[in-house]
Image (cartoon, rainbow, N blue to C red):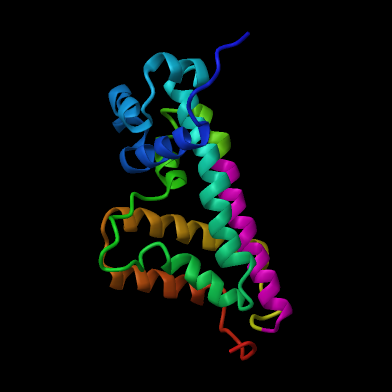
Amino acid sequence: MGRKQLWDQAEVLASAMRLFRSRGYLGASLRDIEEATGLHPGSLYRAFQSKDGLFCAALDAYNDQVVRSRVRTHLLEPPDPVAGIRSFFTSTFETGPDADPDPGCLLTNTAVESFVVPQAADAVRRGLETIESGFAEALTRARALGLLSVALDVEVSAAQLLALYQGLLVLVRAGAPRSKLHTITDGAMASIGPVKEGLR
């Protein structure tokens, strides 16, 4: 009979996710991983084979738990899809006065380090495609509701919003002033054209 697993994989991945978000792949040492997850190297390697394996598993969990949740909350469910697009941007930097510093988006951080962990490239692509698809869905609904011009090219606009969103996340991580982040958000909203009277 195999050895019974005495730890919760979801909790381990959540801890690894937080560590990699704050320190990145290169900045997280084996000792950091042990302290964050509470597991010894033998258990980690039996479960994930390597640091790369743990990182990719944490990134998959991030896509499933964080990225999909944000897309659903801001881009798929709001009755006003244009307002949802704006909140998708502003929610990355509009936090309460007592909030902890944002460790950044694991997708964006990993894209910068993808040359270090090439196995993570597919997960990064999937996560970005989830966001772009969410933008496209919100834009399509906005057109159908008469909030945006029927001439809007949804595919092009969704790609542009994704690029602007990723740039915004880099600036959030770098500590850019909120005034600049709001300016970028306003520019992103302007890129999809004037908003018509509808749900407003």
Q: Quadrant of the C terminus?
A: bottom right
Front position in the image: 25 or 157: 25
What residue is rendered at 40% in x and 40% in y? 112
Question: In the visual, does 142 lie left or right of 181?
Answer: right
Figure quadrant of residue 126: top right
Where is residue 9 shown, x and y percent of the image? 51, 31
In this rendering, the answer to whether 145 lies above or below 115 is below
Q: How many marks?
A: 0
Residue 157 in view:
no
Question: In the visual, does 149 lie left or right of 110?
Answer: right
Where is residue 199 shown, x and y percent of the image? 63, 87
As for residue 144 lying within the magenta part, the answer is yes
Where is residue 49 shown, x and y percent of the image? 50, 17
As for residue 14 lying within the magenta part, the answer is no
What residue is rendered at 40% in x and 43% in y? 109
Front position in the image: 98 or 176: 98
What residue is rendered at 49% in x and 66% in y? 88
Front position in the image: 166 or 104: 104
Where is residue 198 shown, x and y percent of the image? 65, 89
In this rendering, the answer to whether 141 lies above or below 24 is below
Main SS, magenta residues: helix
Span colored in magenta: 124-146
In this rendering, the answer to whether 106 lies above or below 131 is above
Q: Quadrant of the N terminus?
A: top right
